[in-house]
Image (cartoon, helix red, strand yellow):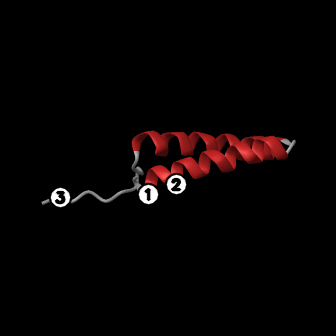
């Protein structure tokens, strides 16, 4: 497995755990961001900030 996909799955799990344990607005906001970023990284398998080799 790609290391970025593993990172995405970990972010998904952390976001879900935060959503289930914390019951305030900031916790919901942070868990939503983590779940969104984790889902995108898990599906694509890469980050937006990777360098491109231009020759």
Asked if residue 50 is positioned above or below residue 22 in the image, the reply reads below
User: What is the x, y in percent for residue 30?
Assistant: 71, 47
Write down the residue under mark 1: 3
x and y, in percent, of residue 6 in the image: 50, 53
User: How far from the left and from the top, in percent, is residue 3?
Assistant: 43, 57
- Whole-angstrom CA distance, mark 3 to mark 2, is 27 Å
Q: Quadrant of residue 37?
A: top right
Numbered label attached to residue 54: 3
Mark nearer the N terminus (1 vs 3): 1
Q: Residues within 10 Å of mark 3 (few under 14, many from 20)?
A: few
Asked if the residues shown at circle 1 and circle 2 are in contact, with their CB atoms under 8 angstroms apart, the answer is: yes
Location of residue 32 by image quarter? top right
Q: Crowdedness of circle 2 by 10 Å Cα count: few (<14), some, many (20+)?
A: some
Which of pointers 1 and 3 indicates the residue nearer the eye? 1
Q: What element does badge 1 sit on?
A: helix
Residue extending farthest left: 55
Q: Which residue is mark 2?
A: 7
Q: Secondary structure at mark 2?
A: helix
Residue at 44% across, 54% down:
4
């Amino acid at each position: 497995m790609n290391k970025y996909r593993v990172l995405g799955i970990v972010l998904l799990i952390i976001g879900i755990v935060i959503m289930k344990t914390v019951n305030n607005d900031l916790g919901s906001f942070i868990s939503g961001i983590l779940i969104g970023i984790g889902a995108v990284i898990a599906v694509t398998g890469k980050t937006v900030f990777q360098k491109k080799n231009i020759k």
